[in-house]
Amino acid sequence: RRVGILISGRGSNMTALLRAAADPAFPATIALVLSNNPDAPGLATARAAGVAAAAIDHRPFGRDRAAHEAALAAALDEAGVEVVCLAGYMRLLTPFLVGRYAGRMLNIHPSLLPGFPGLHTHARALAAGAKLHGCTVHLVTEVMDEGPILAQAAVPVLPGDDEDSLAARVLVQEHVVYPLALRSFLEGQAPHPPAEAALVNPLP
Ligand code: GRF
């Protein structure tokens, strides 16, 4: 299956997916990495790994999110992308792109959803006194950080944790769980499955 990855920055989750996909037994080829941010460090990482990577800057499109997304979609089509993985992609999506990839767009979010959707998840988990925190891979629907959960990994919140230490503990698990979730999703499903059919839990 041909997979496209959308990033906005560092791209460590992208790197985890690229590493997994380098195994010939992995059921995906990473056909394209796209960023809305031309300065995203992940673009160079992808190219260094021999993967096509391009920036489509959102700024020239102004408020016209759909036009920016149409440009993304055209690039994804050109690369033959069937499944899209959001990996630290920091733009809200409109119904245009969400609808186009319904049931075949995945996201990773740094909390145990449905807890703490949105930004600053680690600070909010600490402020709430959470004892467990983690990450979630889910199918993307029109509501941000909602959609059927494909996989989760939990970590403890330890005494003395700050936002950075907690984020680092979660990130290790993000890099484990995203490739597992993508693999299970691809192996378990027809090319364009309905969202309801995509519920899997690849973790032991
Ligand atoms: C990750 O924590 C991801 O869950 C969140 O943004 C961060 C992106 O990190 N949405 P990276 O770009 O994958 O390194």
Image (tube, helix red, strand yellow):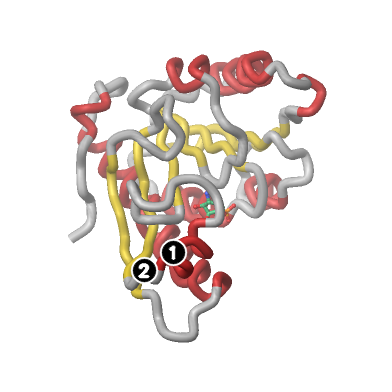
Q: Disc 2 residue type?
A: Ala
Residue 145 picture quarter: top left
Looking at the image, do the residues carrying marks 1 and 2 touch, with CB atoms under 8 Å apart? yes
Location of residue 39 (image quadrant): top right
In this view, 141 is above or below 71: below
The residue sitting at 31% across, 20% down in the picture is: 192
Q: Residues within 10 Å of mark 1 (few under 14, many from 20)?
A: many
Q: Residue furthest front?
A: 128
Disc with the residue nearer the chain's start (1 vs 2): 1
| Residue nearest the observer in this picture, 65 or 41 | 65
Residue at position x 69%, y 45% from top?
Answer: 43
- Disc 1 under 8 Å from ligand 1? The reply is no
On-image quarter of the N terminus: top left
Q: Quadrant of the C terminus?
A: bottom left
| Left or right of 17 in this view: 36 | right
Q: Mark 1 is on which residue type?
A: Ala
Visible residue check, residue 76: yes
Q: Residue 98: x percent and y percent?
A: 46, 22
Q: Looking at the image, which residue is at 32% across and 51% down?
A: 180
Cα–Cα gap, marks 1 and 2: 5 Å
At a point 28% along the width and 36% down the height, the residue shown is 148
Counting from the top left corner in percent of width and height, residue 157 is at 39, 75
Q: Which residue is mark 2?
A: 130
Q: Is residue 128 above or below residue 72?
A: below
Q: 132 left or right of 39?
A: left
Does ligand 1 reach within 8 Å of label 2's beta carbon?
A: no
Query: Picture quarter containing residue 150?
Result: top left
Q: Tag 1's secondary structure?
A: helix
- The residue under label 1 is 125
- The secondary element bearing badge 2 is classed as loop
Q: Position of residue 92 (x, y in %)?
A: 57, 32
Residue 194: give its label.
none
